[in-house]
């Protein structure tokens, strides 16, 4: 074997896979050819451990304009000749090594996936997870990631309208940085990732190619790592100013109708872009590596092909359109060079100064080995499922417990994060960060697009199937709270090493749960990303599927936010016939973790009830019966009520009875519940709607002024609660510094 084990490990190629390569080629590959296989057969590009499982997702919908997985992102028809394009992707491993650039280039990469299809990016969201801020390393990662997202996103002029930030020790040293982008286009302007017909020219536009990001897909995203010092060169470096003009140049070219294909140079760089476009077009390519502009001296062809330098796009055009394309990019001051052409022979043939240095059939590169493994139920699950939740002691002071919960890392205000993001640029934001979901106005239309990202690794750890189901349900629920109907999903599956049978069990069962919820809600999965090998120092992160949902509002003027609106309004709980103080509601809750330091129990969800509640709240919003709506989830009912009070600058006067254990009643987490407020004159309309949808409703109380009160259990000034909630995360950050 001409390549030693160290080289194979660097490329994440096993000995058996190397033998497969020899068998397919009928010869030994040279180093460049092996690099091509290493990148495209990596977990990040080839999905070799996850693709068989991903087929579980249903992707059928008359709205879909491309099949899931066929293009850079999913495309959904929203009527009036318009389509929405969206996807979520991870940049976990790069962010763990260089948090600023890792997060920044994660934003840049997902934005390119969107405008690569001819769409204008109109909104960004993110889902972030870190270890506890009290640890210096986690604080450093948190600060770098947030600054990277804001630094890049604010520069390119795309509003960051929402997302989530969570903390848990399982993410210490291995943060999750998942970025989602939404774009809008006219359906006739949809562009595909293809090399076009034989004879087409391949044109590289954007940045010169450097050494940053080499082995990013194979060596970084496809294996675990313990020491990041030697991996810094694998992290890409972003240039948001160049990205902004690249967006405009590519969109101008797309609108001309003269571009046959457009593709982002993301993971695996030029290798992936060229091979995917060739495969999609049913052609081969000749690539002239010496024609590729380089910003670093002395780069070898191997480095050029595997570089993941950002802000680059590959365009396929007919030869007679070259002058037009050059004129477009000259106007935007973006470099534009012919680097290859399409050929009839379905192979990638790479030349350097007219010397053939690589020749590999396309079909071999796009057909990595697929592994369907056998999972094993994690040993801890029996212990967590059988934990006696009733043994948890009842705190002595409800008010102190509320204070402790409000200042905790996962419930405190995220304003210290969101204030760094520009969410008003493009002037289309109707609901920005801090609510259940975001809402963006569709230009030239009365329509609006709602969006949310959600996931709960703790629930998936306790029961992967139910946790996966809840992730889908909650993301859609947050969209429904705005009045929009969820129309499609994207997801990012963040897990540990799939070769570990217990991790594979988590992955398989989470996917099965997500697929089941998607089917029951009738919302297809149209795009996504898989990030595996999220482990440091022998420990895996919580299994964390993040679900991004997009909903359609036919009338953006009819919407709802979480804040209470007027004193005296009625407040009710949809999906709650009573508050029984059931200790089973402690399962995986913030209360159980924050107050008692315990992660245990089995989460629950009734999907029949979930479907009914979501349909009901959408009806109530669009019929303008309610003034506010807020998903009741993390922290339980009382946290939900406090958040709605703070958001509205008002108080709450509770009238409901606390039965059973007060801590379970107030802080227990039960799915499929939404708190809404409405004017008293709409009470009969609300109850009629609840009856017609078959949803239980419970009167909670009324909107007050300056006090938060619940009979004889809690009575506190709102300004006290607001101060605690708003300062919680800032205090943790300052303590870490």
Image (cartoon, grey):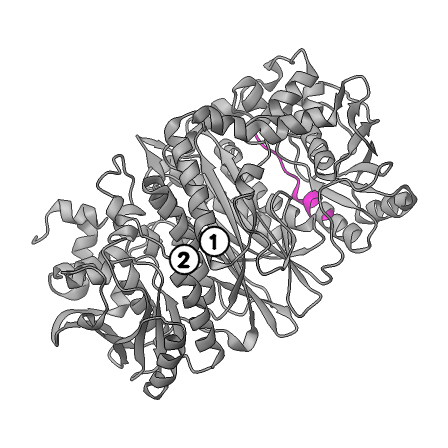
> Is 327 placed left or right of 616 in the picture?
left
Residue 602 location in percent, x, y? 56, 29
Query: Could you say where residue 21 lies in the image, as x and y percent from the top left?
Result: 19, 59
Q: What is the span of residues highlighted in magenta in the rendered image?
A: 602-612
For the residue labelled by badge 2, is the local secondary structure a helix, a strand or a loop? Answer: helix
12 magenta-colored = no
Residue 366 located left or right of residue 87: left
Q: Do tag 1 and tag 2 residues touch (Cβ < 8 Å)?
A: yes
Marks counted in the figure total 2
Is 299 situated above or below 736? Answer: below
633 to 340, vertically: above or below: above
Residue at numbered disc 2: 240
Instruction: Assign a secondary structure to mark 1.
Output: helix
User: Furthest-left residue in view?
Assistant: 2
Q: Identify the residue at image location x=57%, y=19%.
A: 595
Q: Which quarter of the figure is the C terminus placed in?
A: top left
Query: Residue drawn at (44%, 63%), measured in percent from left and top?
Result: 244
What distance separates the C-alpha of mark 1 from that of mark 2? 8 Å
What residue is disc 1 on? 153
């Amino acid at each position: 074997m001409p390549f030693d084990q160290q080289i194979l490990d660097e490329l994440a190629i096993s000995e058996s896979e190397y033998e497969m390569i020899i068998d397919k080629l009928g010869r030994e590959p040279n180093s460049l050819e092996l690099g091509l296989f290493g990148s495209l057969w990596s977990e990040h590009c080839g999905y070799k451990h996850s693709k068989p499982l991903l087929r579980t997702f249903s992707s059928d919908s008359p709205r879909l304009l491309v099949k899931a997985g066929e293009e850079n992102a999913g495309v959904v028809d929203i009527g009036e000749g318009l389509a929405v394009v969206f996807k979520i992707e991870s940049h976990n491993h790069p962010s763990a090594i260089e948090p600023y650039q890792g997060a920044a280039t994660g934003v840049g990469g997902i934005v390119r996936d969107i405008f690569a299809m001819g769409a204008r990016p109109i909104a960004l969201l993110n889902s972030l997870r870190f270890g506890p801020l009290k640890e210096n390393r986690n604080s450093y990662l948190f600060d770098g990631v947030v600054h990277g997202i804001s630094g890049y996103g604010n520069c390119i002029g795309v509003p960051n309208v929402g997302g989530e930030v969570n903390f848990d020790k399982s993410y210490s040293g291995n943060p999750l940085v998942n970025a989602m982008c939404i774009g809008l286009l006219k359906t006739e302007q949809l562009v595909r990732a293809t090399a076009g017909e034989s004879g087409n020219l391949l044109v590289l536009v954007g940045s010169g190619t450097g050494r940053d990001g080499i082995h990013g897909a194979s060596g970084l995203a496809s294996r675990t790592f313990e020491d990041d010092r030697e991996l810094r060169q694998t992290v890409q470096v972003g240039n948001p100013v160049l990205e902004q003009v690249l967006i405009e140049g590519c969109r101008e070219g797309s609108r001309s109708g003269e571009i046959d294909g457009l593709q982002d140079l993301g993971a695996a760089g030029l290798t992936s872009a060229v091979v995917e476009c060739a495969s999609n077009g049913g052609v081969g390519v000749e690539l002239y590596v010496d024609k590729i502009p380089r910003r670093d001296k002395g780069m070898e062809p191997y480095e050029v092909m595997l570089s993941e330098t950002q802000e680059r796009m590959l365009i396929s055009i007919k030869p007679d359109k070259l002058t037009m394309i050059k004129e477009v990019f000259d106007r935007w001051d973006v470099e534009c060079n012919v680097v290859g052409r399409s050929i009839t022979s379905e192979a990638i043939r790479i030349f350097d100064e007219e010397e053939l240095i690589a020749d590999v059939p396309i079909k071999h590169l796009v057909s990595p080995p697929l592994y369907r493994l056998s999972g094993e139920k994690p040993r801890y699950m029996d212990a967590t499922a059988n934990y006696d939740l009733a043994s948890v002691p009842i705190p002595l002071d409800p008010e102190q417990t509320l204070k402790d919960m409000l200042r905790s890392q996962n419930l405190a205000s995220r304003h210290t994060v969101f204030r760094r993001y520009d969410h008003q640029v493009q002037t289309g934001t109707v609901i920005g960060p801090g609510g259940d979901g975001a809402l963006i106005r569709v230009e030239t239309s009365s329509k609006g697009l709602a969006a949310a990202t959600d996931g709960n690794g703790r629930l998936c750890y306790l029961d992967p199937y139910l946790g996966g189901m809840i992730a889908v349900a909650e993301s859609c629920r947050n969209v429904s709270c705005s009045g929009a109907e969820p129309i499609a999903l994207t997801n990012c599956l963040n897990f540990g090493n799939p070769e570990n049978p217990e991790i594979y069990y988590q992955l398989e069962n989470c996917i099965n749960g997500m697929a089941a919820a998607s089917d029951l809600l009738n919302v297809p999965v149209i795009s996504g990303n898989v990030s595996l090998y999220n482990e440091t120092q022998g420990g895996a992160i919580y299994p964390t599927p993040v679900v991004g949902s997009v909903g359609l509002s036919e009338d953006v003027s009819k919407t709802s936010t979480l804040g209470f609106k007027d004193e005296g309004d009625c407040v009710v709980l949809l999906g709650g016939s009573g508050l029984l103080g059931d200790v089973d509601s402690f399962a995986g809750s913030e209360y159980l973790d924050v107050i008692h330091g315990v992660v245990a129990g089995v989460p629950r969800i009734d999907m029949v009830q979930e479907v009914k509640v979501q349909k009901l709240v959408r009806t109530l919003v669009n019929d303008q019966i309610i003034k506010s709506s807020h998903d009741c989830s993390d922290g339980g009912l009382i946290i939900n009520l406090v958040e709605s009070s703070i958001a509205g600058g008002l108080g709450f006067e509770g009238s409901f009875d606390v039965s059973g254990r007060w801590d379970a009643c107030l802080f227990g987490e039960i799915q499929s519940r939404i708190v809404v407020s409405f004017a008293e004159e709409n009470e009969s309309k609300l109850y009629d709607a609840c009856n017609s949808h078959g949803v239980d409703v419970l009167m909670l109380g009324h909107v007050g002024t300056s006090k938060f009160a619940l009979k004889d259990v809690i009575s506190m000034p709102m300004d006290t609660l607001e101060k605690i909630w708003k300062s919680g995360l800032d205090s943790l950050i300052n303590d870490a510094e």
